[in-house]
Amino acid sequence: MKSKSIGILTVIIVLVVFFNWYSNNLIQAQSPLTYTFDPTWPKALPNNWKMGGVTGLAVDNNDNVWVYNRPNDLTSIELHAEVNNLTDNGPQPLALCCVRPPSMIMFNREGVVIQSFDAPQGHGMDVDNEGFVYLGQDTVRKYDPVQGALVAEVKRTPERENGGRVGLPINQERTLGIGGRGPVANFIRVAGEEETSPDPDVEAMEIARVRAFREKYPPETPMIVGGIEEIRIIESDNEMYVADNYLGGRVLVFALDTFNFKRGWGAYGKPLSEISIDDSDHYYEPNGEMPIDFAGHLTINVSNDGLVYAADRNANRIHVTTKDGEFLKEFVLMPSTGVGGSTGGVAFSPDPEQKYLYISDLTNNRIWFLLRATGELVQQMGHMGENGGQFFGLHMIDVDSEGNIYTGEVFQGERAQRFVPSNSLKGELLLQLEDI
């Protein structure tokens, strides 16, 4: 009798444990905003490549994933396989790994590299339905994806405010085995290092130079003036939306077939001509008042119902307008965030109504899930770290037709990752493996 009671008790305990496990996973799987890291994507890069920081990411209409990376982020200690060491058996690489990759790499759904080409590195990208690739460099350039040949480019000013180079590099050849200072060198401040005070005369000359440039190229200049932050192709309208970082950010719209300028606007939908050339009007202090103009690092995306979402990262906000720039509303996200701001890339949930906004956050290393109608924060995902599924410089984000989220990282991240819905078949299998 006692043995029978123990047997019944054991069955009950097993059933309770199973029910709790099943209920917890069912609740997690049923949430439309619950995602699981997919360690099977992407597959290992071919040709001994090591990826640099990801500055552009786009999912095309076949759910292929295009990743625009910065090969020049790699340091010399990551490029030993590019250098041959002469031995009795002939030239041998100094080490087994690695070599620079091409700047544009295309993965299929399974994470296999199926195409690549090496264009000058830059920032922001998109792909049209025919597979042509639009890359943000010192302007927007359209490339043939097969040959990597330049097809067309958007007109830009012949000079830049910071005096930087204009046009394609004359020679893109790199010294084998010699890399750069790394992806974070310019962002690191050494403890105890004193900042030098600028010479007043030099500072006054610089202020005058900048003002002269801005008067020469006023905010309404109908071409690219700064650098490119993001590109969005809307083929149904034959239009291309570009975030130009001049004066903290301008939303510019060009005809897709001719690349002719059509219209543009600034913060709160103001006409381009009303954007201030005074830096103080673009300044944001964490938890402070919102600036009257965009603060910087502006990214954009366009919803199925024709709304334009402009994420002003340095001011921790997202502006919603019509396609003509009529201002509708402002969403503020994590307003206490400093350094680089919280509102990076903008993506939409895959449902027809696109109920949710997915926002990538470079500074907090989170994906924020917002209700698109109200901007209400309903969920978050991620944490800073170097393990799979964590982020170290979360920069780019996009979503495929099945709801899988793809991310790209800069800084020490330098990788692309995939997160699958937990209620998908693969998501459920991955959740079960976590418990084994």
Image (cartoon, rainbow, N blue to C red):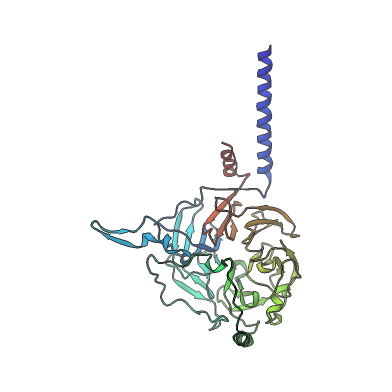
x and y percent of residue 91 in the render?
28, 60
Horizontal side of residue 402 vs 49, given as left or right: right
**In the figure, 159 relative to 96: above or below?**
below
| Residue at 50%, 66% in the rendered image | 132
Question: Residue 390 or 233: which is nearer the viewer?
Answer: 390
**Which quadrant does the C terminus fall into?**
top right
Question: Residue 399 or 159: which is nearer the viewer?
Answer: 159
**Which quadrant does the N terminus fall into?**
top right
Question: Residue 384 or 381: which is nearer the viewer?
Answer: 384
Can residue 98 be seen here? The reply is yes
x and y percent of residue 32 in the render?
67, 48
Can residue 353 be seen here? The reply is no
Instruction: Determine the residue located farthest toward the front in the rendered image.
Output: 192
Horizontal side of residue 414 vs 250, given as left or right: left
**In the figure, 414 relative to 291: above or below?**
above
| Residue at 51%, 59% in the rendered image | 414
Question: Residue 38 or 353: which is nearer the viewer?
Answer: 38
x and y percent of residue 206 in the render?
60, 85
| Residue at 57%, 57% in the rendered image | 392
Instruction: Determine the residue located farthest toward the top in the rendered image.
Output: 1
